[in-house]
Image: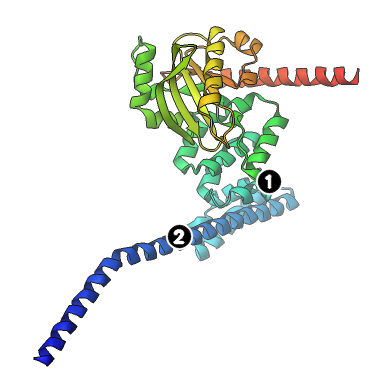
């Protein structure tokens, strides 16, 4: 009997041990999987960084060799020969086309500061997608925003093809201002609102008919909220629609309220169907001051307003100096325009804006000397 009792107790302990082991196994497996995945990610980042820097150095060395001989014919001969040698040893990754990309990469990014700052977030394929971008400031903009918002290569290409830089408010500023803001973003992760907000948004995915109301417009945005947020930019969090604001006993309704995580600001959005009107400014100022008093929390910056209009009255917008009130005005299009015509129009707007800033800057310096 005693022997049987001992056996019974041993069996109970064995079963309890199995139950405890089975209970703890999922947690243990999950933890170990997390460790493995984390280590793999670090290894992948290290490999990516090393390979990108290797490609940069290879490109620099080939460029130096070709430049040293100062003969275009020499380059035409040496690159195919070098590629054939390397492919035979290391594989197709060193095909002639790839070697020429490395040369272009080293030429476009001669200063490694930008590459080093983005190298953990951007793969070699990201950098290849940046190669066709001609203007240095545009490339730096896309590299920094890609790093900041963790864009995939597909998303990066989409942003470039949709002319995101030209549509962003910062593109209208003087080059010195753009360079300064990108430097702060790269070194301090400080994001200027001008890098976030755009002058024009493509909302063709809303599927609106030729005739629609502001209510229909708002409903379409909420229906396609995820795509709308992708278009206005990463970091926006939806908070409320038709937010009731009571001032002097009167009801006012804010169309959409968002919060931007990196800017640490509430973003009030007012939707308008026609052209911008001067009266929209006072209405938005009212919303922003109310949000500042009643909704803004400790550690947040003052709210920003975005008025989305079908068309802009540029002269009115410029004269009203909306930026001083924390208000942005942008156009939206519900059908994708001809990109060639759009590019010409945006480039013209950028040129005129920069000429205006430069002219005002010269006047300020002249008055200061006087």
Residue 315 point in image, percent of width and height: 62, 9
Disc 1 versus disc 2: nearer the observer? 2
Identify the residue at horizontal 46%, vertical 43% (top origin): 152
Q: Nearer the viewer, residue 133 or 194?
A: 194
> Circle 2 is placed at which residue position?
38
- Give x and y (percent) for residue 73: 67, 48
At 56% across and 57% down in the image, what residue appears? 51
User: Residue 198, can we see it?
Assistant: no
Neighbor class of circle 2 (other Cα within 10 Å; few <14, some 14-19, many 20+) is few
Question: What is the crowding at mark 1: few (fewer than 14 residues within 10 Å), some, or many (at least 20)?
Answer: few
- Residue most toward the left? 1
Give the Cα distance between marks 1 and 2.
47 Å
**Foreground residue among 174 and 100:** 174
* Contact, mark 1 vs mark 2 (Cβ under 8 Å): no
List x then y, in percent, for residue 87.
Answer: 51, 60
259 shown above or below 125? above
Say which residue appears at 46% left-offset and 13% top-offset.
Answer: 272
- Write down the residue under mark 1: 72
Q: Is residue 231 above or below residue 148?
A: above
Image quarter (top left, top right, bottom left or bottom right) of the C terminus: top right
Q: Residue at x 46, y 16 (%)?
A: 246
Q: Is residue 18 above or below residue 159?
A: below
Say what secondary structure mark 1 lies in. helix
The N terminus - image quarter: bottom left
Q: Is residue 366 visible?
A: yes
Disc 1 or 2, which lies upstream in sequence? 2
Q: Is residue 203 left or right of residue 137?
A: left
Disc assigned to residue 345: none
Q: Nearer the viewer, residue 24 or 79?
A: 24
């Amino acid at each position: 009997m005693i022997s049987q009792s001992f056996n019974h107790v041993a069996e109970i302990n064995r079963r309890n041990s199995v139950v405890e082991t089975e209970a703890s196994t999922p947690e243990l497996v999950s933890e170990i999987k997390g460790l493995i995945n984390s280590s793999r990610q670090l290894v992948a980042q290290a490999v990516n960084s090393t390979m990108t820097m290797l490609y940069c150095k290879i490109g620099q060395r080939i460029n130096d060799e070709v430049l040293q001989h100062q003969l275009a014919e020499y380059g035409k001969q040496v690159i195919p020969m070098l590629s054939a040698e390397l492919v035979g040893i290391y594989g197709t990754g060193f095909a002639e086309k790839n070697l020429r990309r490395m040369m272009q990469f080293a030429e476009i990014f001669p200063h490694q500061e930008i590459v080093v700052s983005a190298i953990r977030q951007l793969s070699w394929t990201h950098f290849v997608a940046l190669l066709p971008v001609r203007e240095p400031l545009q490339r730096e903009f896309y590299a920094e925003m890609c790093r900041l918002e963790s864009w995939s290569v597909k998303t990066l290409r989409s942003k470039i093809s949709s002319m995101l830089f030209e549509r962003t408010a910062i593109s209208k500023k003087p080059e010195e201002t753009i360079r300064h803001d990108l430097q702060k973003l790269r070194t301090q992760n400080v994001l200027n609102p001008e890098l976030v907000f755009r002058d024009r948004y493509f909302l063709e995915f809303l599927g609106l008919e030729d005739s629609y109301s502001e209510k229909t417009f708002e409903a379409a945005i909420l229906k396609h909220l995820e795509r709308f947020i992708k278009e206005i930019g990463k970091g926006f969090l939806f908070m409320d629609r038709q937010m009731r604001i009571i001032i002097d006993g009167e009801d006012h309704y804010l169309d959409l309220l968002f919060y931007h995580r990196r800017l640490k600001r509430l973003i009030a959005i007012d939707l308008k169907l026609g052209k911008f009107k001067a009266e929209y400014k006072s209405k938005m100022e009212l919303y922003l001051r109310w949000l500042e008093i009643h909704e803004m929390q400790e550690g947040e910056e003052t709210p920003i307003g975005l008025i989305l209009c079908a068309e802009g009255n540029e002269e009115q917008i410029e004269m009203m100096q909306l930026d001083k009130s924390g208000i942005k005005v942008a156009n939206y299009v519900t059908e994708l325009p001809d990109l060639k015509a759009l590019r010409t129009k945006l480039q013209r707007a950028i040129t005129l804006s920069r000429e205006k800033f430069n002219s005002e800057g010269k006047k300020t310096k002249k008055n200061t000397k006087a």
